[in-house]
Image (spheres, grey):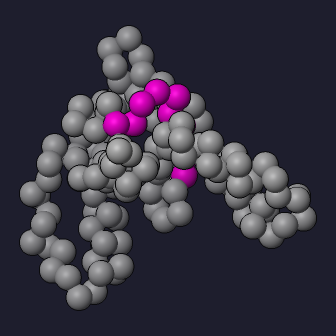
Amino acid sequence: MRNFIGGTYKYQIDAKGRVRIPAKIKNLLGSNLMIGIGDQENLVIYTEDMMDQLYDKYSKMEVSDPEYKKQRYKFGLMFYFTPDTQDRYQIPQILREKIGLKSEALFVGMANKLEIWREDVYYKTLAEDNPDKEISSIKGKLNG
């Protein structure tokens, strides 16, 4: 069975940009993680399996392929994501600045990867993406 990553968790970011990954899903991620900019105003923590899939897809593309060129920005802002001795993960400053992360992070499981959002941006995006759902009723009822 595959490790399915789901749920929404709110965690503190310390003054140095370090955060803990929610214990409930940390083991599902495995090791050899990478973090990068997402497709919206978010960050993404990629598992080793996801990175293998991306490698397989983009390593075979020609440099002239428009899809290859679109990914240069994303891959240029991708970093190894490893814990320190106290099991905290450093979110690179450039990534925190790109999405305006300050003292809190919202972790959102997305099947095979984990997204990191600013809470206000996440709920605004969620409401825009799901206009027929009552999004305000789930705010503050997180797993973490």
Residue visible at 41% across and 16% down in the picture = 84
Image quarter hosting the C terminus: top left
Observer-nearest residue: 137 or 27?
27
Observer-nearest residue: 107 or 60?
60
Whether residue 79 is visible, yes or no, is yes
Image quarter hosting the N terminus: top left
Please tell me in which quadrant of the rendered image residue 28 appears.
top left
Residue 91 appears left or right of 3: right
Residue 114 appears left or right of 106: right
Image: 41 above or below 82: below
Instruction: Residue 141: give x, y in percent of width and height.
Output: 9, 57
Image: 63 above or below 124: above
What residue range appears in magenta?
28-37
Instruction: Residue 26: give x, y in percent of width and height.
Output: 32, 33
Instruction: Residue 61: give x, y in percent of width and height.
Output: 82, 58
Q: Tell me if residue 116 is in the magenta stretch.
A: no
Residue visible at 27% across and 57% down in the picture = 119
